Image (cartoon, grey):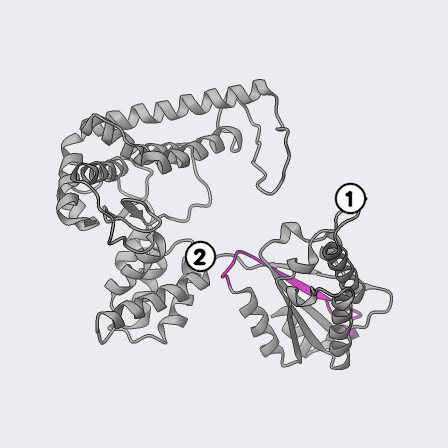
Amino acid sequence: MEFVHFLKNPKKYQDLGAKIPKGALLVGPPGTGKTLLAKAAAGEAGVPFLSLSGSDFLELYVGVGCSRVRNLFNEARKCAPSIVFIDEIDAIGRARSHGHGDSSGAQNERESTLNQLLVEMDGFGTTAGVVVLACTNRPDILDKALLRPGRFDRQITVDKPDIKGRDQIFQIYLKKIKLDRVPSYYSQRLAALAPGFSGADIANVCNEAALFAARTEEAQVTMDHFEAAIDRIIGGLEKKNMVISKLQRRTVAYHEAGHVVAGWFLEHTEPLLKVTIVPLGTAALGFAQYIPNENLLMTKEQLFDMTCMTLGGRAAEKVLIGAISTGAQDDLEKVTKMTYDQVAVYGFSEKVGLLSFPQREASFEMSKPYSSKTGAIIDNEVREWVNKAYERTIQLIDEHKEKVAQVAELLLEKEVLQQDDLLRVLGARPFKSVELSNYDRFKLGFQDEEKF
């Protein structure tokens, strides 16, 4: 809106001696609508809009990239005020290497294209009136010279939407679909059912639901179709051709029942939506689907309960079947990462102290930022914490083993259990939440949250 205002009323700013900002960099995860936002800004401002993607500047022939950048900006200056939009700018804006050896021709070509872009945006003879909008989902690899004020004055983060944002995005896409109820009924419930979904994911959910309805010859799209669409997006396609022996199927059922019962009787875990032992593409032999609340802060107690719930499957196998299987591998990976984060990143451990050693994903550092002695303390702490959580989970499963067996047998019979089925077997959860959870919103829509 700020840029639209600049471009519509440039005189107002010039009278005060202000210069129109040169550019804005839209940063955010894939599918959040960065390109859509730039298109919308151009449409609102009503000025000429020149658009190219970063890869358009990179050609086999030397000098073509620089020449394209020059032509693009010459064109933009002729029809100023105007907007230049560069999609996926990381293709040309990657940080320049500081090596002294001979780099490849492609590298030289990219660097000279970037240098030309730097000069055009804020060099020796620039003219005002051209605003550059650019998008990337990898701001960490961009050259520092590109990000300084005078080139990209604004860095706008376009993040994944929160529950209110998802509600509004759902309303846009639901207008195009033939529904059996008003769009707001669905948008509120689906917004709660899809935490962490980006705008592109939401468009995909609506499309998949319509495809499901069309495939089953329905006249309208219903809630069942939306739930099936979300299942498909989270878990993948159902594997029809997988042959599982009765014993393995029973193990999977008891494993999933262990997760369910452990989560049901722990205070700080998320409410369960459904559990299934139908083999799915990405979710292996079975999975339990939760509706997480978007907690920005997590306490030590919450993380401990989550660890116990994740270990519930392995504990149920040990207590009720008496033999453990490889099915808990994914759970153990999550537990290891979660516990290492608590000890080495969040400073929860008294022995390690208030130190944080976050893992740098993109870097190739061979040396760790702590001594081998500290490394040994971290490893021991992680092992102790996980063992403590496992002992507590074994105890919990042992206490409720009849319930685990009932849930597992019901799973073997019905294959998919909803929360209503679990309420009949396990009774109401013994904890009352203080705030409205995403599960409540999914069931009831957005009620007046202050009353709650």
> x, y (%) of residue 191?
36, 60
Q: Is residue 30 magenta?
A: yes
Eyeballing the image, is 104 above or below 200? above
Mark 2 lies on a secondary structure that is loop
Amino acid bearing label 2: Asp
Is the residue 175 above or below the residue 443 in the image?
A: below
- Residue 446 visible to the viewer: no
What residue is shown at x 73% (from left), y 54% (from top)? 107
Q: Amino acid at mark 1?
A: Gly
> For numbered disc 1, what is the local secondary structure?
loop
Q: Residues within 10 Å of mark 1 (few under 14, many from 20)?
A: few
| Residue that appears at 83% across and 64% down | 123
**Which residue is more in the foreground, 141 or 397?**
141
Mark 1 or 2, which is nearer the eye? 1
Q: Relative to 346, is 176 on the left or the right?
A: left
**Magenta span covers which residues?**
13-32
Residue 121, by quadrant, is bottom right
Residue 162, which numbered label? Answer: 2
Q: Which residue is mark 1?
A: 99
